Amino acid sequence: MGKKTEPIPGTSDIFPAEIAEWLLLETEARRVFGLYGYGELRTPVMERTAIFERSIGEQTDVVQKEMYTFEDRGGRSLTLRPEGTAGIIRALVDNGIPQGDEKRVYYIGPMFRGERPAAGRKRQFHQIGAECVGTVAPETDIETIEMLMRYFDAIGIRNTRLLVNSRGTIADRPKIADTLTAYFRDHLDDMCEDCQRRLETNVWRILDCKNETCCNIVAGAPAITDLLSAESRDFFQRACDRLDLLGLPYTVDPRLVRGLDYYEHTVYEIAFDGIGAQNSLAGGGRYAIEVPGHNKMVYGTGFAIGMERLILARHELGVATATENGIDAYLVSIGEEAFAANIKLARDLRSQGFRIAMDLQGRGTKAQMRTANKLEAPAALIRGDHELVRDMVVCKNLSASEQLEIAIDDLPAHLQSILNARFIGTAHAEE
């Protein structure tokens, strides 16, 4: 016997019983984001590698260690998308978004990073994200945060913490980088090997390190907010003022930078402390991205939400999503003539919106009833020769263990009454 096949480490199968929760998260995202004028944009799951190297930053951990990159048959270097923003910007620029125009889009889909799998962290993971492109006002940053918090409220996630900071402008970076480098150089011998390398390649990335010793060193590092230019301080203050105006509680984390180099000015994370070390549910901020081959900088603001982490948080909070039963009724056939008649009945009931399954293998009555119970069908619709000649069907309510003989013409209404009673009973049980 061959070895058992399993998903690739860091990936998972999502079965029908789980899908209801995923669909709820997606449906609520579409509804809430639509309130703010956002439309869905779907981009390929792979792009030219240069798209990510240029936008994310060649010295980031994502580009250096985590991207799934390969050469296609044409000799082009391609990468499975590790995040959504770069592809969104590429799509908008390729399709001629006019300079200065504002474009609001959201996306839902899988991303890929070669990280060590853990709770809430996978190699194929799923994100919901939104981008407001072509805007430079801090008020847009805050509107996206407000939209994000409204979404969390809609899906039942409470007790989150909003952490905000500023990365300043590109012009601020040399001063900030020099100050951080001088500080971390004094602690070089105590830092992990990755951070010793980062000190020479991209000092900002040290602030993202999860090594316990490095985290303690980072806690004493100079605050970025103390190193900003007057222009950047004013921009950040306006953003904080708008958060206050909307009554959105927040904490300034002066060492929060996010893990991608395209960020500038406002950056933020939404943390939830009930899901372990990977406690960031969402993150985002303002960015400036140069798209290869277009020689222009694109400005925008946006965020990405980890769907797997949302599900962990909802379960931690006890927020349940009712799993829809796969079917409304199971047709049981007794004899060849009933089997043929039930094929037509199944078609007619499906045309009226009922979810119907039936045995197509000619099994016995007991086997068919076992399947109906296994599928948790609310009703079994049983027909044999006796029912056929009178245009009747035996409708067995499997929840109440009751059965009635119903005329075919009355069957849709009776079946709907069973489904309605089941729905009301479930709702009362959850109260």
Image (cartoon, grey):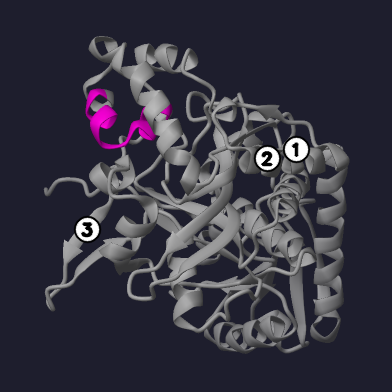
The mark nearer the N terminus, 3 or 2, is 3
Are the residues at dot 3 and dot 2 in contact (C-beta closer than 8 Å)? no
Q: Position of residue 300 (x, y in %)?
A: 58, 60
State left or right for residue 96 relative to residue 162.
left
Nearer the observer, 30 or 344: 30
Residue kind at label 2, given as amino acid type: Phe
Q: Position of residue 60 (x, y in %)?
A: 32, 42
Crowd rating for badge 2 (residues with CA inside 10 Å; few <14, some 14–19, many 20+): many
Is residue 321 magenta-colored?
Answer: no
Question: Could you say whether the residue bearing mark 1 is in a helix, strand or loop?
Answer: helix
Residue at coordinates 87% horizontally, 52% vertically from top-left? 424
State left or right for residue 249 relative to residue 173.
right
Residue at coordinates 72% horizontally, 44% vertically from top-left? 152
Nearer the observer, 399 or 73: 73
Residue placed under numbered mark 2 in the picture:
236
Question: Could you say whether the residue bearing mark 3 is in a helix, strand or loop?
Answer: strand
Alpha carbons under labels 1 and 3: distance apart: 39 Å
Question: Could you say whether the residue bearing mark 2 is in a helix, strand or loop?
Answer: helix
Are the residues at dot 1 and dot 3 in contact (C-beta closer than 8 Å)? no
Q: Residue furthest front?
A: 230
Count the marks. Answer: 3
> Which one is in front in this view, the residue at disc 1 or the one at disc 3?
1
Residue kind at label 1, given as amino acid type: Cys
Question: Which residues fall within the magenta stretch?
Answer: 196-207
Residue at coordinates 57% horizontally, 57% vertically from top-left? 129
Residue placed under numbered mark 1 in the picture:
240
Q: Could one spot residue 209 in this view of the protein?
A: no
Q: Does residue 204 lie above or below 39 as drawn?
A: above
State left or right for residue 299 relative to residue 430.
left
